[in-house]
Amino acid sequence: MNQVLVMAIKDLRLLFRDKLGAFFIIGFPILMGIFFGMVMGGPSSGSSRAKMKIAIVDLDQSSLSAKFVSLLESNESIEVIETELELAKEGVRKGQRLAMLVLNEGFGETAGIFWEKPPTIQIGVDPSRSAESAMLQGMILEGIGQLASQRMGDLSSMQDMLKKSRKQLANDQSISSGNRLLINSFFSSLEGMTQSIRALQTDADDSSSSPVGNGGFEFAKLKSIDVSRKIDPASQPGQMKKIKSKWDISFPQSTMWGVLACAAGFAISIARERTQGTMMRLQIAPISRSEVLIGKALACFLSVMLVISFMVGLGLLLGMRPGSYSMLALAALCIASCFVGIMMVMSNLGTTEESVNGAGWAINMVMAMFGGAMIPVMFMPQFMKSLSILSPVKWGILALEGAIWREFSLSEMMLPCGILLGVGVAGVAIGTRMLNHK
Amino acid sequence: MSNSIAEVSALKKSFGDIDAVSGLSFAIQQGETLGLLGPNGAGKTTVISLLVGLLKPDSGSVLIGNSICAEVGAPTLTATRRMLGVAPQALSIYETMSAQENLEFFGRLYGLSGKKLRDRVNWCLDFAQLQDRAKSRAETFSGGMKRRLNIAVALIHEPAILLLDEPTVGVDPQSRNHIFESIESLRERGMTILYTTHYMEEAERLCDRVAIVDHGKLLALDTVDNLIDQYGGASTVTGALAELSQTIEIPGELTGNSIRFSSDTPLQDVAALSAKGVTFQTLNIARPNLENVFLTLTGRSLRDG
């Protein structure tokens, strides 16, 4: 065992002394991960300052609802289109609109009157743009506040509304005499106030209204409505909904690039031992051939584990939050085992470093292309998806994704992990046999 | 032979139609330097590979110490491997590791550790005259330094037998001399060495006994002097005469005043001529060497390959 460790340490030392090799193992995957993470964007990306496109369904069709719509239209951050209910929903579903608002009948009767029950505005938001939806809700409340301000500033409208409210109060027998007296007194004060304001307006040129905060009053109730269709959790959109960070997809992919580079690097190292003559020294040393191979395999295994650990660590710093660390460890172990086997086969595909390198990278590129290390499998055309099952890279990515965001149970992890382990065992057996034959 | 540390018996190894080693038998005595002298393709490296167990013979056996090292179907014992140190013809060191790291790595493979390892590494660095470059990567070394490190690595575990396969190939004269001195120092320490070469000068200088091999066959094995005596033929005397007397009988060829003749007893013959009154302006006595031995045994020159 001691000799195996001596071999492994030597190989790791040689691997990381090769600066270009080390770059392809560590640096390249990081660049890939960050690049694709940035390109893919995702739930946490909210840097865009483009206008928020919203659809409004005005079922009230009152002057107040129209005023509210125009207030929203005046907001530079919002682009409004009035449409019908189903078209609005479709627009949000298809990602054409950030959100849809429904102004129900009766909106104009109570909107902006702080002593009335606040109007309910139904809002349906694209689930993938939650950060923008919070901003939109703030703007809606701001619009209602402006509506209240304008309504208070329109004295004749205010006086008509007070008359109407007095009539409603008189007809409402459920209100106690004490409360009735209190409310009437309040209405009288408001009438006095509106008359005083009107008198002042004749003497002074009033400026435009200022925005009104909610000041403890509730301007509107925002009620969420589901705009999405029922999505099969196993479907692509269903899976996509589980993604929590833009790094969730790019990091498993880029980690596999590092793993591929490790396998290629160690495959070459066996050929290099042959060409530089050190394999002969190893063969005549008091160390068995299997110990030499186990040493190589151990070094490859450790370097793959190192790459995965490093990439996960970097992902954590950037905001990736694996769903299960134990599953992640399982995935890492299985991936390392698999690619040790692949390395062993690759190392025997040529007799020189150049031939092993060429063959190794050719195989790596095909595995990466069909395995989803270039384009995620879920975005591939069907024929590529079908072929991807032949690529260990696909199962490696799936195992990592299962641990990071797909929320795989242990039994669900068995499929990718079992395949990875199977490939690993087969690879070690075939590679050892090929090496012994040579 | 009772004092032998290794014995090769009727060793045969073929690669397809080519008989690389054909019934080779010899023994290496404890503490001697045995040379395997032969042209390129004579089968010297194959013999080394058979000795260390890298190749399995088609027939015959190799005995190292008391263990069968290579035999048809016989395993190579780990304990036997520890007795052998090999400096292959091709450099076999890690170029991106320093001299010290190379020595430490191979030392650990042979089970050395701690102070013992440090002592051996220092000894090997001294031996290879690489103490001041111990931390430098081998890739920065000259060809001669790499060769010395290649030999030093073979010595890290203090092997009982050192196998040197053409250790001076591609080395400049100065480095070659360094290597010769290093090997001579090992001889003085009583190390057993098997030294393969196609340079007769090296065999003559370094080896106690020389086995002459060609086409995988052992043609002769003895000390250099005995080989020359037995197969070298006569010495060649050449010179220019100061004056020529018609009455004195001159052996060999006489062209103008230049004389050339062969003799088994050249000094006596020259002395006899002088006694007869022959005066030499110049005189050269060329003693036969292993080249002549090889020529006698094979009908061709060592350098013909």
Image (cartoon, coloured by chain):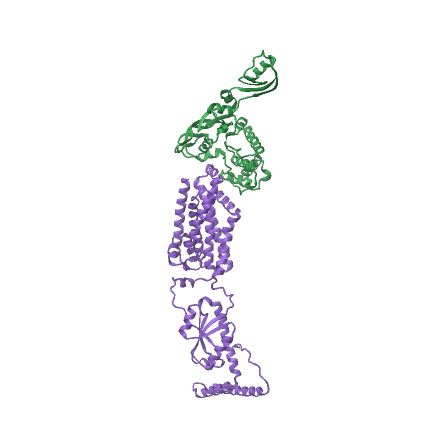
**Is residue A30 or residue B90 the one in the foreground?**
B90
B22, above or below A140, in the image: above
Residue A2 shows in this picture: no
Residue A9 shows in this picture: yes
Number of on-image labels = 0
Question: Residue A229, located in which quarter of the rendered image?
Answer: bottom left
Question: Residue A230, located in which quarter of the rendered image?
Answer: bottom left
**Is residue B290 or residue A310 the one in the foreground?**
B290
Question: In the rendered image, what is the letter of the chain coloured green?
Answer: B
Q: Percent from the top left, x then y, of residue A115?
A: 49, 81
Q: Percent from the top left, x then y, of residue A318?
A: 51, 59
Question: Residue B76, located in which quarter of the rendered image?
Answer: top left
Q: Percent from the top left, x then y, of residue A401?
A: 43, 57
Residue drawn at (56%, 12%) of the image:
B249
Which residue is at the far top?
A: B247
Q: Percent from the top left, x then y, of residue A353?
A: 47, 44
Question: In the rendered image, what is the letter of the chain coloured purple?
Answer: A
A253, above or below B44, in the image: below
**Is residue A404 or residue A205 the one in the foreground?**
A205
B153, above or below A112, in the image: above
